Amino acid sequence: MHLTREEEDALDEKHGQSISIAYKILLSIGKATNAERLIPVDWVHLSGVNYNTIGESGVNFLTKYSQEASFVVPTTINPMGYDSHKKTRLSNNFKRQQGEIVKAYEKMGSIPSFSCIPYEIFQLPDREHNVSFAETNAAVMANSVFGLHTNKESSLSALASAVTGKAPYSDLRINSIRDPKIKIKVETELNTELDYGVLGYFSGKSVKESCVSFGDHTSNIDMYKTKSLAAALGTSGACGMFSNRVINGESISFGKEEAKSVMDELNTTESGDVIALGSPQLGMYELKLLSDMIGDKKFSKKCMIFCPRSIYEKASNSGIAQRLENAEANLICDACTCLSPLLTHEEYDGVITNSVKAAHYLNKSNGVSVCLNDLRSIIREHTK
Amino acid sequence: MNYIKCKVIVGGRASGRLLATKQPINFLSSVDHSTGMITDKNHDLCGRSLKNHVLVFPYSVGSSVGAYSIFALKSNSVSPSAIICTLKADITTASGCAIANIPLLELCRDRDIPEFENYDEGIIDGISGILQIKKV
Protein backbone atom coordinates (compact mmCIF):
# COMPACT_ATOMS: atom_id res chain seq x y z
CA MET A 1 0.00 0.00 0.00
CA HIS A 2 1.29 3.41 -0.97
CA LEU A 3 1.67 5.92 1.86
CA THR A 4 2.15 9.64 1.25
CA ARG A 5 5.23 11.33 2.69
CA GLU A 6 3.14 12.68 5.55
CA GLU A 7 1.67 9.24 6.30
CA GLU A 8 5.17 7.72 6.25
CA ASP A 9 6.28 10.35 8.77
CA ALA A 10 3.33 9.55 10.99
CA LEU A 11 4.17 5.85 10.81
CA ASP A 12 7.75 6.73 11.84
CA GLU A 13 6.51 8.28 15.09
CA LYS A 14 7.11 11.86 13.95
CA HIS A 15 3.66 12.81 15.26
CA GLY A 16 3.77 10.66 18.39
CA GLN A 17 3.42 7.02 19.29
CA SER A 18 -0.39 6.78 19.23
CA ILE A 19 -0.62 8.07 15.66
CA SER A 20 2.20 5.70 14.68
CA ILE A 21 0.31 2.74 16.17
CA ALA A 22 -2.79 3.79 14.23
CA TYR A 23 -0.82 3.83 10.96
CA LYS A 24 0.72 0.48 11.81
CA ILE A 25 -2.81 -0.94 12.10
CA LEU A 26 -3.93 0.74 8.86
CA LEU A 27 -0.85 -0.61 7.08
CA SER A 28 -1.54 -4.17 8.23
CA ILE A 29 -5.19 -4.11 7.19
CA GLY A 30 -4.26 -2.34 3.97
CA LYS A 31 -1.87 -5.18 3.16
CA ALA A 32 -4.44 -7.79 4.18
CA THR A 33 -7.13 -6.32 1.94
CA ASN A 34 -4.79 -5.39 -0.96
CA ALA A 35 -5.41 -1.65 -0.70
CA GLU A 36 -3.36 0.72 -2.84
CA ARG A 37 -3.88 3.80 -0.69
CA LEU A 38 -5.69 5.37 2.24
CA ILE A 39 -8.83 7.46 1.77
CA PRO A 40 -10.68 9.81 4.14
CA VAL A 41 -13.64 8.61 6.21
CA ASP A 42 -16.43 10.88 7.52
CA TRP A 43 -17.67 8.92 10.55
CA VAL A 44 -16.37 6.15 12.78
CA HIS A 45 -18.31 3.76 14.96
CA LEU A 46 -16.27 1.87 17.56
CA SER A 47 -16.77 -1.46 19.26
CA GLY A 48 -14.67 -2.55 22.21
CA VAL A 49 -16.49 -0.58 24.91
CA ASN A 50 -17.91 -3.35 27.12
CA TYR A 51 -15.43 -4.49 29.80
CA ASN A 52 -16.90 -7.97 29.47
CA THR A 53 -15.45 -8.17 25.94
CA ILE A 54 -12.09 -6.38 26.03
CA GLY A 55 -11.01 -7.34 29.55
CA GLU A 56 -8.14 -5.95 31.58
CA SER A 57 -5.62 -5.89 28.75
CA GLY A 58 -8.05 -3.81 26.69
CA VAL A 59 -8.53 -1.35 29.56
CA ASN A 60 -4.77 -0.98 29.98
CA PHE A 61 -4.28 -0.47 26.25
CA LEU A 62 -7.02 2.20 25.97
CA THR A 63 -5.94 4.04 29.12
CA LYS A 64 -2.41 4.37 27.78
CA TYR A 65 -3.49 5.02 24.20
CA SER A 66 -5.89 7.82 25.18
CA GLN A 67 -3.13 9.79 26.92
CA GLU A 68 -1.94 11.02 23.55
CA ALA A 69 -4.58 10.16 20.93
CA SER A 70 -7.66 12.12 19.95
CA PHE A 71 -10.39 11.53 17.37
CA VAL A 72 -10.40 13.67 14.25
CA VAL A 73 -13.81 12.61 12.85
CA PRO A 74 -17.22 12.18 14.58
CA THR A 75 -16.94 8.90 16.49
CA THR A 76 -19.80 7.04 18.13
CA ILE A 77 -19.28 4.11 20.49
CA ASN A 78 -20.91 0.75 21.19
CA PRO A 79 -22.84 -0.26 24.33
CA MET A 80 -20.95 -0.81 27.56
CA GLY A 81 -21.60 -3.50 30.16
CA TYR A 82 -24.49 -2.06 32.16
CA ASP A 83 -26.87 0.85 32.71
CA SER A 84 -25.05 3.23 35.04
CA HIS A 85 -28.34 4.98 35.94
CA LYS A 86 -29.68 1.79 37.54
CA LYS A 87 -28.68 -0.26 40.54
CA THR A 88 -26.62 -3.28 39.62
CA ARG A 89 -25.15 -6.26 41.41
CA LEU A 90 -22.02 -6.17 39.28
CA SER A 91 -18.75 -6.13 41.20
CA ASN A 92 -17.01 -2.90 42.06
CA ASN A 93 -14.06 -4.06 40.00
CA PHE A 94 -16.27 -4.43 36.91
CA LYS A 95 -17.73 -0.94 37.43
CA ARG A 96 -14.30 0.58 38.00
CA GLN A 97 -12.80 -1.03 34.90
CA GLN A 98 -15.87 -0.09 32.84
CA GLY A 99 -15.46 3.47 34.11
CA GLU A 100 -11.83 3.53 32.91
CA ILE A 101 -12.91 2.48 29.42
CA VAL A 102 -15.60 5.16 29.26
CA LYS A 103 -13.09 7.75 30.50
CA ALA A 104 -10.54 6.75 27.84
CA TYR A 105 -13.05 7.05 24.99
CA GLU A 106 -14.34 10.36 26.37
CA LYS A 107 -10.80 11.70 26.57
CA MET A 108 -10.24 10.86 22.90
CA GLY A 109 -13.42 12.76 22.01
CA SER A 110 -16.07 10.12 21.35
CA ILE A 111 -19.78 10.87 21.25
CA PRO A 112 -21.17 8.98 24.30
CA SER A 113 -23.77 7.03 22.31
CA PHE A 114 -23.32 3.61 23.99
CA SER A 115 -25.33 2.15 21.15
CA CYS A 116 -24.86 -0.54 18.50
CA ILE A 117 -27.49 1.13 16.28
CA PRO A 118 -25.94 4.53 15.46
CA TYR A 119 -27.90 4.43 12.19
CA GLU A 120 -31.17 4.86 14.13
CA ILE A 121 -30.13 7.69 16.41
CA PHE A 122 -27.75 9.90 14.42
CA GLN A 123 -27.83 11.72 11.13
CA LEU A 124 -25.05 9.78 9.43
CA PRO A 125 -23.22 10.98 6.30
CA ASP A 126 -25.03 10.72 2.96
CA ARG A 127 -25.05 7.58 0.84
CA GLU A 128 -21.78 6.60 -0.86
CA HIS A 129 -19.67 8.37 1.74
CA ASN A 130 -16.89 6.34 3.35
CA VAL A 131 -17.16 5.56 7.05
CA SER A 132 -15.43 3.01 9.33
CA PHE A 133 -17.86 0.90 11.28
CA ALA A 134 -16.78 -1.78 13.70
CA GLU A 135 -19.71 -3.55 15.40
CA THR A 136 -20.79 -6.07 12.84
CA ASN A 137 -24.51 -5.30 12.67
CA ALA A 138 -23.78 -1.60 12.19
CA ALA A 139 -21.28 -2.29 9.40
CA VAL A 140 -23.68 -4.61 7.56
CA MET A 141 -26.59 -2.17 8.03
CA ALA A 142 -24.47 0.81 6.90
CA ASN A 143 -23.48 -0.95 3.67
CA SER A 144 -26.72 -2.74 2.90
CA VAL A 145 -29.44 -0.33 3.98
CA PHE A 146 -27.90 3.13 4.24
CA GLY A 147 -25.61 2.97 1.20
CA LEU A 148 -22.54 3.98 3.19
CA HIS A 149 -19.20 2.39 2.30
CA THR A 150 -17.36 0.54 5.05
CA ASN A 151 -15.47 -2.65 5.45
CA LYS A 152 -16.40 -4.96 8.30
CA GLU A 153 -13.95 -3.14 10.54
CA SER A 154 -12.48 -4.44 13.77
CA SER A 155 -12.44 -2.46 17.03
CA LEU A 156 -8.80 -1.61 16.43
CA SER A 157 -9.02 -0.78 12.72
CA ALA A 158 -11.93 1.59 13.43
CA LEU A 159 -9.96 3.12 16.31
CA ALA A 160 -7.09 3.74 13.86
CA SER A 161 -9.57 5.42 11.48
CA ALA A 162 -10.95 7.61 14.29
CA VAL A 163 -7.44 8.84 15.13
CA THR A 164 -6.26 9.39 11.54
CA GLY A 165 -9.55 10.05 9.71
CA LYS A 166 -8.48 7.46 7.14
CA ALA A 167 -9.06 3.88 6.03
CA PRO A 168 -7.56 1.67 3.31
CA TYR A 169 -9.40 1.86 -0.01
CA SER A 170 -10.26 -1.81 -0.41
CA ASP A 171 -12.92 -4.51 -0.44
CA LEU A 172 -16.44 -3.07 0.19
CA ARG A 173 -15.18 0.46 -0.38
CA ILE A 174 -14.77 -0.48 -4.07
CA ASN A 175 -18.00 -0.38 -6.10
CA SER A 176 -17.36 -3.57 -8.10
CA ILE A 177 -17.00 -5.61 -4.89
CA ARG A 178 -20.34 -4.25 -3.67
CA ASP A 179 -22.01 -6.08 -6.56
CA PRO A 180 -22.98 -9.48 -5.16
CA LYS A 181 -21.35 -12.45 -6.91
CA ILE A 182 -23.18 -15.09 -4.90
CA LYS A 183 -26.81 -15.51 -3.88
CA ILE A 184 -28.78 -17.43 -1.29
CA LYS A 185 -31.68 -19.29 -2.87
CA VAL A 186 -34.37 -19.21 -0.18
CA GLU A 187 -36.51 -22.36 -0.37
CA THR A 188 -38.51 -21.98 2.82
CA GLU A 189 -40.98 -19.45 4.14
CA LEU A 190 -39.63 -16.42 5.98
CA ASN A 191 -42.20 -14.92 8.30
CA THR A 192 -40.72 -13.66 11.54
CA GLU A 193 -37.64 -11.68 12.56
CA LEU A 194 -36.24 -14.95 13.91
CA ASP A 195 -36.56 -16.56 10.45
CA TYR A 196 -34.45 -13.72 9.03
CA GLY A 197 -31.90 -14.11 11.82
CA VAL A 198 -31.58 -17.81 11.08
CA LEU A 199 -31.16 -17.04 7.37
CA GLY A 200 -28.44 -14.50 8.21
CA TYR A 201 -26.55 -16.90 10.48
CA PHE A 202 -26.63 -19.68 7.87
CA SER A 203 -25.52 -17.27 5.12
CA GLY A 204 -22.61 -15.87 7.12
CA LYS A 205 -21.31 -19.39 7.62
CA SER A 206 -21.79 -20.36 3.98
CA VAL A 207 -20.49 -17.34 2.09
CA LYS A 208 -16.82 -16.38 1.77
CA GLU A 209 -17.50 -13.32 -0.38
CA SER A 210 -17.90 -9.80 1.05
CA CYS A 211 -21.40 -9.25 -0.40
CA VAL A 212 -24.31 -11.67 -0.77
CA SER A 213 -27.65 -11.36 -2.54
CA PHE A 214 -30.95 -12.47 -1.02
CA GLY A 215 -32.88 -11.21 -4.07
CA ASP A 216 -36.48 -10.12 -3.43
CA HIS A 217 -36.52 -11.63 0.05
CA THR A 218 -34.96 -8.51 1.52
CA SER A 219 -36.74 -5.92 -0.64
CA ASN A 220 -39.67 -5.02 1.59
CA ILE A 221 -38.91 -6.16 5.10
CA ASP A 222 -39.32 -4.09 8.25
CA MET A 223 -36.55 -2.73 10.48
CA TYR A 224 -36.77 -5.59 12.99
CA LYS A 225 -36.25 -8.28 10.34
CA THR A 226 -33.51 -6.27 8.63
CA LYS A 227 -31.55 -5.78 11.85
CA SER A 228 -32.02 -9.42 12.80
CA LEU A 229 -30.67 -10.53 9.41
CA ALA A 230 -27.73 -8.08 9.44
CA ALA A 231 -26.66 -8.93 12.99
CA ALA A 232 -26.75 -12.68 12.42
CA LEU A 233 -24.93 -12.40 9.08
CA GLY A 234 -22.16 -10.43 10.76
CA THR A 235 -21.94 -12.80 13.73
CA SER A 236 -21.32 -16.06 11.92
CA GLY A 237 -19.20 -14.91 9.01
CA ALA A 238 -16.92 -12.43 7.31
CA CYS A 239 -19.54 -11.08 4.91
CA GLY A 240 -20.15 -7.35 5.42
CA MET A 241 -23.05 -6.58 3.08
CA PHE A 242 -26.24 -7.98 1.63
CA SER A 243 -28.08 -6.85 -1.44
CA ASN A 244 -31.52 -7.42 -2.99
CA ARG A 245 -30.10 -7.32 -6.50
CA VAL A 246 -31.26 -10.36 -8.44
CA ILE A 247 -28.22 -12.11 -9.95
CA ASN A 248 -27.69 -15.25 -11.99
CA GLY A 249 -24.37 -16.35 -10.48
CA GLU A 250 -23.49 -19.10 -8.05
CA SER A 251 -26.18 -19.90 -5.49
CA ILE A 252 -26.46 -21.68 -2.15
CA SER A 253 -29.79 -23.18 -1.07
CA PHE A 254 -31.41 -22.32 2.25
CA GLY A 255 -34.32 -24.59 3.07
CA LYS A 256 -35.97 -26.16 6.11
CA GLU A 257 -33.02 -28.44 6.80
CA GLU A 258 -30.50 -25.58 6.79
CA ALA A 259 -32.74 -23.56 9.11
CA LYS A 260 -33.05 -26.55 11.42
CA SER A 261 -29.26 -26.96 11.63
CA VAL A 262 -28.93 -23.35 12.85
CA MET A 263 -31.69 -23.85 15.41
CA ASP A 264 -30.09 -27.12 16.57
CA GLU A 265 -26.83 -25.25 17.24
CA LEU A 266 -28.28 -22.19 18.99
CA ASN A 267 -31.57 -23.24 20.58
CA THR A 268 -30.12 -25.08 23.55
CA THR A 269 -32.98 -25.24 26.04
CA GLU A 270 -36.76 -25.63 25.97
CA SER A 271 -37.45 -22.62 28.17
CA GLY A 272 -35.75 -20.04 30.36
CA ASP A 273 -36.18 -17.90 33.43
CA VAL A 274 -35.53 -14.50 31.84
CA ILE A 275 -36.56 -12.84 28.58
CA ALA A 276 -33.92 -10.64 26.91
CA LEU A 277 -34.81 -8.48 23.92
CA GLY A 278 -32.44 -6.26 22.00
CA SER A 279 -29.38 -7.48 20.20
CA PRO A 280 -29.01 -5.24 18.32
CA GLN A 281 -30.57 -2.73 20.73
CA LEU A 282 -34.20 -1.97 19.98
CA GLY A 283 -35.20 1.24 18.21
CA MET A 284 -38.50 3.14 18.32
CA TYR A 285 -40.14 0.95 15.69
CA GLU A 286 -39.51 -2.21 17.70
CA LEU A 287 -40.45 -0.69 21.08
CA LYS A 288 -43.78 0.45 19.61
CA LEU A 289 -44.36 -2.94 17.99
CA LEU A 290 -43.63 -4.64 21.28
CA SER A 291 -45.87 -2.34 23.27
CA ASP A 292 -48.74 -2.86 20.78
CA MET A 293 -48.30 -6.64 21.00
CA ILE A 294 -48.38 -6.64 24.80
CA GLY A 295 -51.40 -4.37 25.13
CA ASP A 296 -52.62 -4.45 28.74
CA LYS A 297 -50.92 -7.71 29.64
CA LYS A 298 -47.89 -8.15 31.89
CA PHE A 299 -44.78 -10.30 31.49
CA SER A 300 -45.02 -13.49 33.53
CA LYS A 301 -41.20 -13.77 33.62
CA LYS A 302 -38.46 -11.27 34.26
CA CYS A 303 -37.95 -9.28 31.04
CA MET A 304 -34.99 -7.11 30.07
CA ILE A 305 -35.28 -4.79 27.07
CA PHE A 306 -32.07 -3.17 25.81
CA CYS A 307 -32.19 0.15 23.94
CA PRO A 308 -30.10 3.32 23.52
CA ARG A 309 -30.76 6.03 26.13
CA SER A 310 -31.89 8.53 23.47
CA ILE A 311 -34.49 6.01 22.25
CA TYR A 312 -35.62 5.43 25.83
CA GLU A 313 -36.12 9.18 26.27
CA LYS A 314 -38.17 9.36 23.08
CA ALA A 315 -40.21 6.35 24.18
CA SER A 316 -40.81 8.03 27.53
CA ASN A 317 -42.08 11.17 25.83
CA SER A 318 -44.57 9.18 23.80
CA GLY A 319 -45.71 6.94 26.68
CA ILE A 320 -44.35 3.75 25.12
CA ALA A 321 -41.67 3.27 27.80
CA GLN A 322 -44.28 3.59 30.56
CA ARG A 323 -46.52 1.02 28.85
CA LEU A 324 -43.62 -1.44 28.71
CA GLU A 325 -42.66 -0.71 32.31
CA ASN A 326 -46.29 -1.20 33.34
CA ALA A 327 -46.00 -4.63 31.74
CA GLU A 328 -43.12 -5.15 34.19
CA ALA A 329 -40.36 -5.01 31.61
CA ASN A 330 -37.03 -3.55 32.71
CA LEU A 331 -35.74 -1.11 30.08
CA ILE A 332 -31.95 -1.06 30.18
CA CYS A 333 -30.01 1.71 28.44
CA ASP A 334 -26.36 1.91 27.27
CA ALA A 335 -25.97 -1.91 27.26
CA CYS A 336 -26.99 -4.81 24.99
CA THR A 337 -28.13 -8.43 25.38
CA CYS A 338 -25.13 -9.90 23.67
CA LEU A 339 -22.16 -10.32 26.02
CA SER A 340 -23.99 -8.57 28.82
CA PRO A 341 -22.56 -9.38 32.24
CA LEU A 342 -26.16 -9.08 33.45
CA LEU A 343 -26.96 -12.48 31.89
CA THR A 344 -24.79 -15.16 33.46
CA HIS A 345 -25.19 -18.89 33.95
CA GLU A 346 -24.72 -18.40 37.68
CA GLU A 347 -27.91 -16.35 37.78
CA TYR A 348 -30.02 -17.87 35.02
CA ASP A 349 -30.69 -21.40 33.77
CA GLY A 350 -31.86 -20.19 30.40
CA VAL A 351 -32.47 -16.99 28.45
CA ILE A 352 -35.48 -16.59 26.16
CA THR A 353 -34.72 -14.35 23.17
CA ASN A 354 -35.59 -13.78 19.53
CA SER A 355 -32.05 -12.65 18.65
CA VAL A 356 -29.81 -15.10 16.83
CA LYS A 357 -26.81 -12.89 17.54
CA ALA A 358 -27.59 -12.88 21.26
CA ALA A 359 -28.10 -16.66 21.17
CA HIS A 360 -24.63 -17.15 19.67
CA TYR A 361 -22.82 -15.10 22.33
CA LEU A 362 -24.98 -16.17 25.28
CA ASN A 363 -24.32 -19.82 24.43
CA LYS A 364 -20.66 -19.54 23.52
CA SER A 365 -19.33 -16.65 25.63
CA ASN A 366 -21.67 -16.32 28.63
CA GLY A 367 -22.22 -20.09 28.86
CA VAL A 368 -26.00 -19.64 29.28
CA SER A 369 -28.51 -21.90 27.53
CA VAL A 370 -30.85 -20.15 25.13
CA CYS A 371 -34.46 -20.68 24.12
CA LEU A 372 -34.84 -19.06 20.69
CA ASN A 373 -38.32 -18.03 19.68
CA ASP A 374 -39.92 -15.27 17.62
CA LEU A 375 -41.22 -12.15 19.35
CA ARG A 376 -44.92 -12.84 18.82
CA SER A 377 -44.57 -16.33 20.32
CA ILE A 378 -42.52 -15.01 23.26
CA ILE A 379 -45.23 -12.44 24.02
CA ARG A 380 -48.00 -15.04 23.60
CA GLU A 381 -46.32 -17.55 25.90
CA HIS A 382 -44.92 -15.25 28.55
CA THR A 383 -47.48 -12.51 29.16
CA LYS A 384 -50.83 -12.70 30.87
CA MET B 1 10.73 -30.12 4.78
CA ASN B 2 8.56 -27.85 2.69
CA TYR B 3 9.14 -24.15 1.98
CA ILE B 4 6.15 -21.98 1.16
CA LYS B 5 6.28 -18.38 0.02
CA CYS B 6 3.64 -16.26 1.75
CA LYS B 7 2.51 -12.65 1.82
CA VAL B 8 3.68 -10.82 4.95
CA ILE B 9 0.90 -8.93 6.71
CA VAL B 10 2.64 -8.45 10.08
CA GLY B 11 6.40 -9.10 10.08
CA GLY B 12 8.52 -11.01 12.58
CA ARG B 13 10.14 -14.38 13.16
CA ALA B 14 8.55 -17.24 15.08
CA SER B 15 8.23 -21.00 15.30
CA GLY B 16 5.99 -23.55 16.93
CA ARG B 17 3.93 -26.70 16.56
CA LEU B 18 1.32 -26.36 13.82
CA LEU B 19 -2.32 -26.15 14.82
CA ALA B 20 -4.32 -26.34 11.61
CA THR B 21 -8.03 -26.12 10.87
CA LYS B 22 -10.17 -25.49 7.82
CA GLN B 23 -12.83 -23.82 10.00
CA PRO B 24 -12.85 -20.02 10.55
CA ILE B 25 -12.55 -18.76 14.15
CA ASN B 26 -14.53 -16.13 16.08
CA PHE B 27 -11.79 -14.96 18.47
CA LEU B 28 -14.27 -13.34 20.84
CA SER B 29 -16.72 -16.18 21.34
CA SER B 30 -14.71 -19.32 20.62
CA VAL B 31 -11.50 -18.81 22.61
CA ASP B 32 -10.88 -18.55 26.36
CA HIS B 33 -8.67 -15.47 26.56
CA SER B 34 -7.07 -16.40 29.86
CA THR B 35 -6.03 -19.95 28.87
CA GLY B 36 -5.84 -19.80 25.06
CA MET B 37 -8.14 -22.83 24.76
CA ILE B 38 -10.69 -23.12 21.95
CA THR B 39 -13.99 -23.57 23.82
CA ASP B 40 -16.58 -23.63 21.03
CA LYS B 41 -18.13 -27.11 20.96
CA ASN B 42 -18.93 -26.63 17.28
CA HIS B 43 -15.28 -26.03 16.36
CA ASP B 44 -13.01 -28.90 15.33
CA LEU B 45 -10.17 -27.50 17.49
CA CYS B 46 -12.37 -27.47 20.62
CA GLY B 47 -10.24 -28.36 23.64
CA ARG B 48 -6.96 -27.42 21.93
CA SER B 49 -4.73 -24.57 23.11
CA LEU B 50 -3.45 -21.81 20.83
CA LYS B 51 -0.51 -21.11 23.16
CA ASN B 52 2.86 -21.06 21.39
CA HIS B 53 1.39 -22.75 18.31
CA VAL B 54 1.52 -21.61 14.71
CA LEU B 55 -2.20 -21.27 14.07
CA VAL B 56 -3.17 -22.14 10.50
CA PHE B 57 -6.77 -21.23 9.67
CA PRO B 58 -8.75 -19.70 6.77
CA TYR B 59 -9.83 -16.33 8.29
CA SER B 60 -11.61 -14.97 11.34
CA VAL B 61 -15.36 -14.42 11.52
CA GLY B 62 -17.87 -12.60 13.67
CA SER B 63 -17.13 -10.03 16.28
CA SER B 64 -15.12 -6.92 15.53
CA VAL B 65 -13.84 -7.14 19.11
CA GLY B 66 -11.89 -10.24 18.06
CA ALA B 67 -8.92 -7.90 17.52
CA TYR B 68 -8.87 -7.10 21.24
CA SER B 69 -9.22 -10.83 21.94
CA ILE B 70 -5.98 -11.51 20.03
CA PHE B 71 -4.32 -8.75 22.06
CA ALA B 72 -5.68 -10.27 25.30
CA LEU B 73 -4.24 -13.67 24.36
CA LYS B 74 -0.83 -12.07 23.89
CA SER B 75 -1.09 -10.06 27.14
CA ASN B 76 -1.98 -13.27 29.00
CA SER B 77 0.99 -15.12 27.38
CA VAL B 78 -1.29 -17.69 25.75
CA SER B 79 -1.30 -16.43 22.16
CA PRO B 80 -0.21 -18.32 19.06
CA SER B 81 3.46 -17.63 18.24
CA ALA B 82 2.38 -16.85 14.68
CA ILE B 83 -0.72 -17.02 12.50
CA ILE B 84 -1.14 -18.16 8.89
CA CYS B 85 -4.37 -17.34 7.06
CA THR B 86 -4.99 -19.85 4.29
CA LEU B 87 -7.84 -18.02 2.51
CA LYS B 88 -7.67 -14.33 3.40
CA ALA B 89 -5.98 -12.35 6.12
CA ASP B 90 -8.97 -10.41 7.43
CA ILE B 91 -9.15 -7.02 9.15
CA THR B 92 -9.80 -8.43 12.63
CA THR B 93 -6.85 -10.83 12.56
CA ALA B 94 -4.53 -8.31 10.90
CA SER B 95 -5.27 -5.47 13.33
CA GLY B 96 -5.10 -7.78 16.36
CA CYS B 97 -1.75 -9.18 15.24
CA ALA B 98 -0.40 -5.69 14.44
CA ILE B 99 -1.06 -4.52 18.02
CA ALA B 100 0.03 -7.77 19.65
CA ASN B 101 3.17 -8.10 17.47
CA ILE B 102 2.24 -11.59 16.34
CA PRO B 103 3.69 -12.42 12.90
CA LEU B 104 0.86 -12.90 10.39
CA LEU B 105 1.27 -14.40 6.93
CA GLU B 106 -1.24 -15.12 4.20
CA LEU B 107 -0.82 -18.00 1.78
CA CYS B 108 -0.39 -16.73 -1.75
CA ARG B 109 -3.67 -17.33 -3.51
CA ASP B 110 -2.20 -18.78 -6.70
CA ARG B 111 -0.65 -21.71 -4.83
CA ASP B 112 -2.13 -25.00 -3.74
CA ILE B 113 -2.81 -25.17 -0.01
CA PRO B 114 -0.54 -27.82 1.49
CA GLU B 115 -2.08 -30.43 3.77
CA PHE B 116 -0.91 -28.78 6.98
CA GLU B 117 -2.39 -31.64 9.00
CA ASN B 118 0.48 -33.81 7.72
CA TYR B 119 3.14 -31.52 9.19
CA ASP B 120 4.12 -30.96 12.81
CA GLU B 121 6.22 -27.85 13.07
CA GLY B 122 6.33 -24.48 11.39
CA ILE B 123 9.08 -21.87 11.27
CA ILE B 124 8.14 -18.45 10.02
CA ASP B 125 10.33 -15.80 8.59
CA GLY B 126 7.98 -12.91 8.50
CA ILE B 127 10.60 -10.68 6.94
CA SER B 128 11.07 -12.63 3.72
CA GLY B 129 7.65 -14.28 3.92
CA ILE B 130 8.97 -17.85 3.96
CA LEU B 131 7.06 -20.46 5.91
CA GLN B 132 9.01 -23.62 6.54
CA ILE B 133 7.01 -26.67 7.60
CA LYS B 134 8.44 -30.01 8.64
CA LYS B 135 7.59 -33.29 10.25
CA VAL B 136 9.19 -33.74 13.63
Image (cartoon, coloured by chain):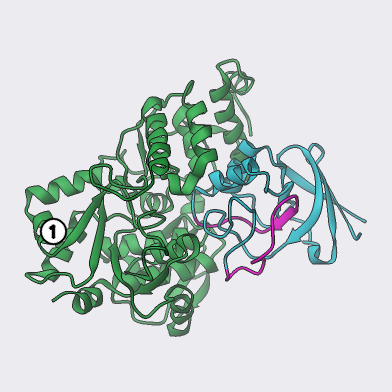
Chain colours: A green, B cyan
Measured as percent of width and height from the top left, residue A100 is found at 41, 33
Q: Is residue B43 magenta?
A: yes
Quarter of the picture containing the C terminus of chain B is: bottom right
Quarter of the picture containing the N terminus of chain B is: bottom right
Q: Residues within 10 Å of mark 1 (few under 14, many from 20)?
A: some
Q: Is residue A315 left or right of residue A341?
A: left
Measured as percent of width and height from the top left, residue B9 is found at 69, 41
Image position of A343 with respect to A97: above or below:
below
Tell me the kind of residue under disc 1. Glu
Instruction: Specify the segment rendered in magenta.
Output: B41-62
Q: Is residue A281 magenta?
A: no
Q: Secondary structure under badge 1? A: helix
Pick whichever, A217 or A279, lies toward us. A279
Q: Residue furthest bottom?
A: A257
At horizontal 55% and vertical 16% (from top left) the residue drawn is: A15
Asked if residue A31 can be seen in this view, the reply is no
Q: Is residue B74 left or right of residue A135?
A: right
The chain holding disc 1 is A
Pick whichever, A156 or A242, lies toward us. A156
Q: Residue at label 1?
A: A325
Image position of B113 with respect to A69: above or below:
below
Q: Is residue B136 left or right of residue A42?
A: right
Pick whichever, A208 or A36, lies toward us. A208
Image position of B92 with respect to B18: above or below:
above
Asked if residue A366 can be seen in this view, the reply is yes
Q: Is residue B95 left or right of residue A153?
A: right
By secondary structure, the bulk of the magenta-drawn segment is best described as loop
